[in-house]
Amino acid sequence: MIPRYSRPEMAALFEESARYRLWLDVELAVCGAMERRGLVPSGATSRIRSRARVDADRIGRIEETVRHDVIAFLTQIGETAGEDSRHLHKGMTSSDLVDTALALALVRATDLLMAEARRLREAARTLAVRHKETVMVGRTHGIHAEPVTFGLKVLVWFEAAGRAIERLARAREGVAVGKLSGAVGTHAHLSPDLEEEALASLGLKPEPAATQIVQRDRHAALLQAVALLGAVVEQMALEIRHLQRTEVREAEEPFREGQKGSSAMPHKRNPVSCERICGLSRILRANAHAALENVALWHERDISHSSVERVILPDSFLAADFMVSQMREVLEGLKVDPERMKANLDLTRGLIYSQRVLLALVESGMSREEAYALVQRHAMDAWKDGPDLPTRLLEDPAVTRVLPREALMACFDPRYFIRHVNQIFERILGEPVASGR
């Protein structure tokens, strides 16, 4: 079943009629290579191409009787192509046809997914540059740590998306492989040279050493790459979910005109897009695991992988494509609240600058152990109530004896912590970038 939220161009690749059209493409490629070698009468390939019609409904009805999808397909094509159809499938086994056509579908699906991932990456770049100097608090373990910028946070996503695209590109090359080597991979009926010629006409390479099938570590690697892309997108979505929490409210996914957040509570603006993305990423990981289970089969082949792939391959690409497209829309319409970020930066009343004070005390001659204990004691008291951390430190002679007031207060300037952000952006983007560009 193709989900209603799928992009039409991706969904179309996994429709039954599309699969049969790819099967016909493969059969015609083999027939053409045989014709050029004089193994098939001259003109047979072009006559088949002009006459053959794919009728998915008719194939389905035939399959109900013969209980074999490839035989049903060849029977239906024979009904429309006529006598020349006897030259189709010569020397081939079902997996020669199915696996080669599957490679074509996966290459096209991967190209579509990479194109959408590049659009997501560009949206991340735009958002990162816009907020390159938007200061906010960094969090580790969910607890306020030190100042960072929202742009730098998004730049991390941009870079991760680039690695995900690179992994997809490598996996695409790995699955752009077909086979025409027969029932157990020995080329008993079709020569390796003919295989290379036919597959080259389809833009594929041959499996160097095959059993009855193209080896499934290739497909497993592809679904690992898809799952990793999903994990990168989930990384973005999960962070936005946290930033949208009522207690934080630093960023919010788009909430469109007429949208409703809850059937019971009219005030709700829930991060439903990001939550959906996080949920679907679990399916991608589960499917990647199933693909690993498909690698080891009995001897030259059993059929246990086939039923699994009919689910995990279309589901993974449809889900991943939806996730990436949805995340791009979220980033393009994301509402960022710099004022709320500033308020949260000051929420702990100076505690996030503790390391800067620690290092300043050490630079002034105090031992690290003494400086750490001193700053931690004041920090723990400031957590509770009363004066903030700067005030407490200014009132401590042990601090003011080694650190003048001006030097101490300089430790609480957030600009110190983001002074290398431009350099990080230049290192990744390869050029100086002005904020908001």
Image: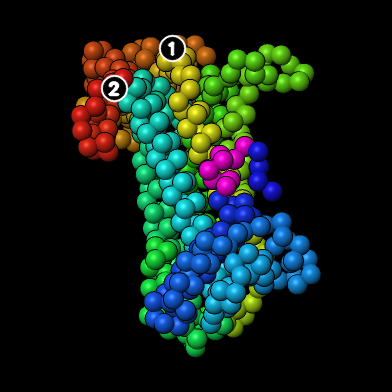
Which residue: 40% across, 48% down? 165
Instruction: Find the distance from the CA under tag 2 to the CA under tag 1.
Output: 21 Å
In the image: residue 188, left or right of residue 367: right
In the image: residue 69, left or right of residue 167: right
Tag 2: amino acid: Arg
User: Around disc 2, counting alpha carbons within 10 Å, would you say few (fewer than 14), some (14 to 19), or many (20 or more)?
Assistant: few
Q: Main structural element of the magenta stretch: helix, strand or loop?
A: helix
Q: Is residue 104 visible in this depiction of the protein?
A: yes
Question: Which of label 2 and label 1 is nearer to you?
Answer: 2
Q: How is the image coloured?
A: rainbow
Q: Is residue 393 above or below residue 112?
A: above
Q: Earlier in the sequence, mark 2 or mark 1?
A: 1
User: Around disc 1, counting alpha carbons within 10 Å, would you say few (fewer than 14), some (14 to 19), or many (20 or more)?
Assistant: few
Residue sitting nearer the eye, 284 or 36: 36
Per the image, the residue denoted by label 1 is 339
Q: Is residue 273 above or below residue 312?
A: above
Task: Give x and y (percent) for residue 278.
Answer: 58, 39
Residue sitting nearer the eye, 296 or 48: 48
* SS at badge 2: loop
Which residue: 72% across, 60% down? 58
Residue sitting nearer the eye, 328 or 101: 101
Task: Give x and y (percent) for residue 138.
Answer: 42, 28
Task: Give x and y (percent) for residue 310.
Answer: 64, 59
* SS at badge 1: helix
* Quarter of image, res 341: top left
Magenta span contains residue 11: yes
Q: Is residue 378 visible in this depiction of the protein?
A: no
Q: How many marks?
A: 2
Per the image, the residue denoted by label 2 is 437
Q: Which residues are magenta?
A: 5-12
Tag 1: amino acid: Glu
